[in-house]
């Protein structure tokens, strides 16, 4: 017969095995879906992001879009911010996303550092800071982009990396570098409501 000591040892071993097994199973579970990720899985929400920190205003004189050296670009802090935002989104349960970016280098670098398996260049996300009269035309193009992609994205989040003037025109918010705006839209891409999400990683 098994001694009381052996019974105690076996009982503790089984208990330890069950606890370890439960921990392993828990760690293997996918990130819990947040309210944000649930909304972004739907066909009614899009997430806009202003590019991360790029010191200055506008761009230097005679800049060109095909030469990053002539533009205002992310600094080290901006690169950190962009990576932090991507990590934060994944912690919120946003594990897959279709990312579009303005052609400006500070937006492309931000989009790349979000680390959602690449991004696509989208002309309607380009800055009209130097030609403010183009705001309505640019915004209509952005609305068409949103309407089209929300119908084909499946459960992937739709993330647009752009400039403050574009976000101001689309959502009515003048946001800081790296801030996010969650926008609920109708079938035509028109804003119905929105929520500003201050730059993740910088909140208490």
Image (cartoon, rainbow, N blue to C red):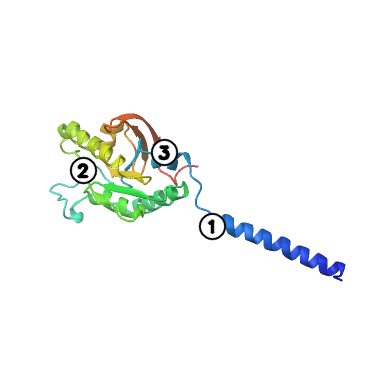
Foreground of the two, 11 or 111: 11
Which label is found at residue 36?
none
**Residue 14 relative to residue 157: left or right:** right
Q: Residue at x 32, y 45 (%)?
A: 153
Q: Quadrant of the N terminus?
A: bottom right
Q: Residue at x 20, y 46 (%)?
A: 59
Q: Where is residue 128 in the image (x, y as percent from the top left)?
A: 19, 38
Which residue lies under the disc numbered 1? 28
**Residue 190 relative to residue 30: left or right:** left
Q: How far apart are marks 3 and 1 (CA)?
A: 24 Å
**Residue 67 relative to residue 112: left or right:** left
Which element type, helix, strand or loop, lies under badge 1?
helix
Q: How far apart are marks 3 and 2 (CA)?
A: 26 Å
Q: Position of residue 99 (x, y in %)?
A: 31, 48
Q: Is residue 35 above or below residue 110?
A: above
Foreground of the two, 129 or 186: 186
Q: Which of marks 2 and 1 is nearer the N terminus?
A: 1
Count of numbered circles in the view: 3
Residue 76 appearing in the image = no
Which element type, helix, strand or loop, lies under badge 3?
helix
Q: Residue at x 21, y 43 (%)?
A: 126
Crowding at mark 2 (Cα within 10 Å: few <14, some 14-19, many 20+): many
Q: Where is residue 181 in the image (x, y as percent from the top left)?
A: 36, 37
Which residue lies under the disc numbered 3? 39
Q: Distance between the residues labelled 2 and 1?
A: 40 Å
Of all residues shown, which one is farthest toward the front? 1
Q: Earlier in the sequence, mark 3 or mark 2?
A: 3
Residue 159 position by quadrant: top left
Which label is found at residue 126?
2
Foreground of the two, 154 or 55: 154
Of all residues shown, which one is farthest toward the top? 192
Q: Position of residue 164 (x, y in %)?
A: 28, 38
């Amino acid at each position: 017969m098994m001694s009381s000591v052996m019974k105690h040892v076996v009982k503790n071993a089984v208990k330890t095995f069950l606890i370890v097994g439960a921990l392993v199973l828990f760690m293997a579970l996918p990130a819990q879906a947040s309210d944000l990720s649930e909304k972004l899985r739907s066909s009614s929400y899009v997430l806009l992001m202003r590019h991360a920190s790029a010191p200055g205003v506008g761009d230097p004189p005679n800049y060109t879009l095909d030469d990053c050296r002539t533009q205002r670009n992310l600094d080290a802090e901006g690169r950190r911010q962009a990576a932090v935002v991507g990590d934060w989104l994944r912690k919120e349960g946003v594990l897959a996303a279709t990312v579009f970016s303005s052609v400006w280098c500070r937006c492309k670098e931000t989009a790349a550092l979000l680390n959602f398996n690449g991004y696509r260049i989208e002309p309607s996300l380009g800055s009209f800071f130097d030609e403010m009269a183009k705001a309505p035309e640019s915004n209509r193009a952005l609305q068409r982009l949103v309407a089209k992609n929300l119908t084909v994205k499946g459960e992937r989040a739709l993330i647009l990396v752009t400039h403050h003037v574009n976000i101001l025109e689309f959502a009515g918010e003048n946001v800081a570098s790296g801030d996010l705006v969650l926008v609920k839209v109708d079938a035509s891409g028109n804003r119905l409501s929105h929520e500003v999400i201050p730059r993740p990683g910088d909140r208490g």
